[in-house]
Image (tube, rainbow, N blue to C red):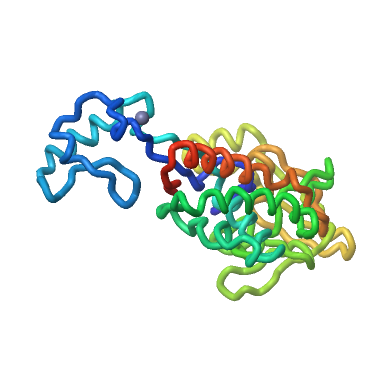
């Protein structure tokens, strides 16, 4: 079963780094090869210049040396950005505002790990972040709300077509028209609703413990009953929607709300941090 995690958590996401200048400034320990044999590759890593040698053992020695040769681990200043769902939500917000206002941020955030933003674009990217924070409260977004506490659980992400869970047979997704469960193979919608109740039935502890002893991948859930609060229509799945893998809200609703500027700080703040480091170092930001 695949679960698309909430955008704030750091799980399978985007990281960035700026290479340090210690080697150029002579602040590293002595390298295992003559200094001129060392170069920075297209991905921001210090490595053996193939014009001098292609010896694998030397490459390994340089790699080991680069890990601890200066005060920066691996000769990099690193910054975790956010998970991929968070990147997609940010890109979606940029498209909703107006991508032509954000020529760098709309094109230079990666779709997979790798690539970089060159130093000449980083000052522009920083001012685009300011602009984004000024404009973001002009847009609205669709959210799945936990009705037990009125907190947002998920924002609708177009790139995932609103999907939250994909199991072997079904997908759970939502959009402005409501939450729905559909068959993977046929895309036939088996359940939908805007105001939904989730009833979770667990196995008794003793049964679950003996099942777990046989197969530790087994779930403690016996079944989950989804009920449309407006029509009474119901559907059952062997899994449910939890906050943290343990707490299952008793209900959900789908709502369109105005976006608040603080909602995107999970990505704007780490981007700002690494852009400032890049300007101080006069180096590119590499995605990894
Ligand atoms: Zn350094």
* Residue 216 visible within the image: no
Where residue 251 sits in the image (x, y, percent)? 81, 49
Tell me residue 57's x, y (percent).
Answer: 12, 38
Whole-percent x, y for residue 190 in the image: 71, 69
Residue 20 percent across, percent down from the top left:
38, 35
Q: Can residue 21 be seen in this view?
A: yes
The answer to whether residue 2 is above or below residue 8 is below
The residue sitting at 24% across, 24% down in the picture is: 29
Q: Residue at x 34, y 45 (%)?
A: 44
Q: Which of 191 and 272 is in front in this view?
A: 272
Query: Residue, x 13% and y 38% (percent of image)?
Result: 58
In terms of image quarters, where does ligand 1 lie? top left
Viewer-closest of 231 and 286:
286
- Quick check: 67 above or below 137? above
89 up-or-down from 281: above or below: below
From the viewer's perspective, tell me whether residue 119 is left or right of residue 130: left
How many discs appear? 0
- Residue that sits furthest to the right in the current view: 230
Q: In this view, does 259 lie to the left or right of 80?
A: right
- State left or right for residue 31 relative to residue 122: left
């Amino acid at each position: 079963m695949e679960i698309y995690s909430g955008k704030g958590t750091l799980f399978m996401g985007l990281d960035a780094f700026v290479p340090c200048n210690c080697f150029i400034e002579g602040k590293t320990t002595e390298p295992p090869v003559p200094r001129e044999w060392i170069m920075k590759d297209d991905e921001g890593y210090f490595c053996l210049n193939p014009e001098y040698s292609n010896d694998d053992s030397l490459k390994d020695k340089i790699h080991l040396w680069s890990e601890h040769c200066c005060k920066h681990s691996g000769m990099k200043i690193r910054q975790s950005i956010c998970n991929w769902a968070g990147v997609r939500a940010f890109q979606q917000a940029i498209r909703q505002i107006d991508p032509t206002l954000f020529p760098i941020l709309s094109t230079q955030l990666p779709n997979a790990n790798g690539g970089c933003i060159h130093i000449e674009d980083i000052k522009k990217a920083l001012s685009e972040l300011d602009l984004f924070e000024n404009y973001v409260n002009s847009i609205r977004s669709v959210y799945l709300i936990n009705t037990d506490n009125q907190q947002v659980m998920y924002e609708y992400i177009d790139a995932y077509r609103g999907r939250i869970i994909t199991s072997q047979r079904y997908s759970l997704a939502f959009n402005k028209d409501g939450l729905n469960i559909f068959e993977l193979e046929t895309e036939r919608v088996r359940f939908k609703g805007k105001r939904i109740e989730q009833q979770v039935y667990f196995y008794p502890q003793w049964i679950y413990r003996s099942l777990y002893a046989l197969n530790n991948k087994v779930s403690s859930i016996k079944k989950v009953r989804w009920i449309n609060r407006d029509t009474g229509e119901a559907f059952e799945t062997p899994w449910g929607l939890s906050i943290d893998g343990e707490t299952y809200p008793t209900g959900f609703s789908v709502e369109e709300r105005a976006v608040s500027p603080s909602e995107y700080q999970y990505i704007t703040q780490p981007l700002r941090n690494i852009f400032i480091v890049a300007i101080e170092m006069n180096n590119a930001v590499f995605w990894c």
